[in-house]
């Protein structure tokens, strides 16, 4: 049996490595060239010939696709306060259909994990950000900072593909609550008390701005001596090109302070950029939350959530966002695109659009089985630096992808399908 080779983009973490090659033999993946140790065991052995298509379900009972789409469209058409949630692993094409549907039915729509997304987006709206492509960082950075994140564990090829830690003489600095795999590979490590992280960031900023500081007060506020922080500030502003990487939840402290920490980093990087070239970039999450957030911003002007219930987009994070309304039960129907599906109170009809083997398929009022991007479905994902990449299916699809199901729902609701 000849070996087939297929170019492949991995979506398992925010690196979105697009240089993999999948080799298949005898209907199975036998090699994943370029895959890291996290992804390779997942890919090896995947069947590349499609099995029988999984069924649609209504209240857990198998039904036809036509009947399921009709029932799902009825639920959405009858709803007065619907929600559209999930979407963290959806393609940009599926996101566009989901937003068109939310607009048609007047839903509040929100992408992925609101707890980490809202502080990040609100901080960016208030303070802006200085970014770059990962390619530019790879080519130019001589100092890289990893703040509250551990890419050596979570993004195994980040060093090799983007941050180039240990190569080209670049200096890596880790600020984190404790030692990690990344800190053990870095040139410098500063242990940060999560409760005093904001004070530390503000102190670093003051040092970069050359504000005179009292050593005793600095030590009391940050847990570090002034000399050590001065050294760190010197290293940062002495960079020819610095890149500050951070994880999704903005450091290790409480989520309530995440927005303030984000803004403190933005302000620090902005002050560093007045003296040298300095940028800040997220590590990126698995899936495509970043891409879907971008499509939502492009279509509605808001992200990571918008309320389309008034006939025009509004955004009230913490008040009437989809996650707030979900938590308070202030909705009468929901469409969940991809797992894991949230707990939906009994009596509220909801539609699950995702993996037929997900437990949500049995729980949902209507379940439409959608192929996973990168396995059964193709489309576009957007990397955390804004670069869009094609994601290809590994095998012919057994079922429509989310974009196609959403287009069918839009059509059943009387909307356009393109
Ligand atoms: S680093 Fe991330 S995107 Fe790249 S192969 Fe590993 S899991 Fe996949």
Image (cartoon, rainbow, N blue to C red):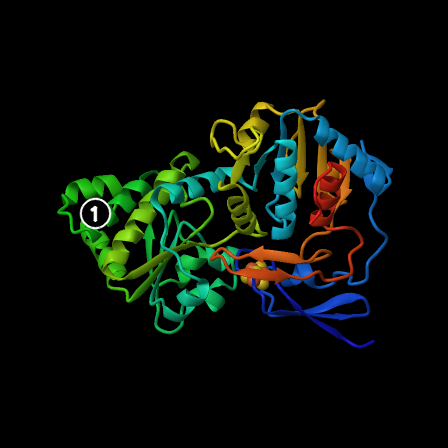
The spot of residue 285 in percent (x, y) is 53, 51
Residue 38's place in the image compared with 323, above or below, is below
Q: Is any part of residue 59 visible from this angle?
A: yes
Residue 62's place in the image compared with 347, above or below, is below
- Quadrant of the drawing holding the N terminus: bottom right
Residue picked out by circle 1 = 206
> Position of 326 compared to 249: left or right?
right
> Quadrant location of ligand 1?
bottom right
Q: Give the residue displayed 65% in from the left and 48% down from the top.
A: 94
Q: Give the residue displayed 36% in from the left and 47% down from the top.
A: 128
The quarter of the picture where residue 202 lies is top left
- The answer to which of 224 and 204 lies nearer the viewer is 204
Q: Secondary structure at mark 1?
A: helix
The quarter of the picture where residue 111 lies is top right
The spot of residue 182 in percent (x, y) is 43, 58
> Position of 328 compared to 212: left or right?
right
């Amino acid at each position: 049996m000849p070996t087939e080779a297929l170019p492949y983009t991995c979506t398992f973490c925010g690196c979105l490595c697009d240089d993999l090659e999948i080799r298949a033999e005898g209907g199975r993946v036998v090699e994943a060239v370029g895959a890291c140790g996290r992804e390779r065991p997942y890919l090896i052995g995947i069947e590349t010939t499609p099995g029988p298509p999984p069924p649609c379900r209504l209240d857990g009972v198998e039904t036809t696709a036509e009947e399921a789409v009709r029932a799902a469209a009825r639920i959405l058409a009858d709803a007065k306060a619907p929600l559209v949630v999930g979407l963290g692993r959806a393609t940009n094409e599926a996101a566009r259909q989901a937003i068109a549907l939310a607009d048609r039915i007047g839903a509040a729509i929100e992408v992925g994990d609101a707890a980490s997304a809202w502080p990040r987006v609100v901080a960016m709206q208030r303070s802006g950000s200085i970014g770059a492509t990962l390619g530019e960082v790879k080519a130019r950075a001589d100092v890289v900072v990893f703040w509250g994140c551990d890419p050596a564990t979570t993004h195994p090829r980040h060093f090799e593909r983007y941050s180039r830690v240990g190569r080209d003489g670049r200096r890596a600095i880790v600020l984190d609550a404790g030692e990690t795999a990344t800190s053990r590979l870095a040139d410098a490590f500063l242990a940060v008390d999560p409760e005093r992280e904001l004070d530390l960031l503000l102190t670093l900023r003051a040092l970069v701005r050359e504000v005179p500081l009292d050593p005793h007060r600095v030590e009391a506020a940050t847990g570090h001596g002034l000399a050590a922080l001065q050294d760190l500030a010197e290293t940062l502003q002495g960079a020819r090109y610095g890149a500050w990487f951070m994880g999704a939840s903005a450091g290790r402290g409480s989520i309530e302070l995440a927005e303030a920490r984000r803004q403190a980093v933005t302000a620090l990087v902005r002050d560093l950029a007045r003296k040298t070239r300095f940028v800040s970039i997220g590590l990126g999450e698995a899936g495509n939350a970043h891409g879907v957030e971008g499509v939502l911003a492009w279509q509605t002007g808001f992200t990571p959530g918008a309320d389309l219930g008034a006939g025009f987009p509004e955004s009230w994070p913490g008040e009437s966002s989809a996650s707030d309304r979900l938590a308070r039960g202030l909705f009468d129907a929901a469409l969940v695109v991809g797992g894991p599906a949230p707990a939906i109170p009994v009596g509220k009809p909801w539609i699950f659009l995702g993996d037929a083997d997900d437990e949500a398929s049995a729980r949902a009022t209507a379940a439409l089985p959608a192929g996973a991007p990168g396995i059964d479905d193709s489309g576009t994902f957007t990397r955390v630096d804004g670069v869009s990449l094609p994601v290809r299916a590994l095998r012919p699809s057994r079922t429509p992808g989310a974009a196609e199901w959403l287009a069918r729902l839009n059509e059943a609701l009387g909307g356009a399908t393109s």
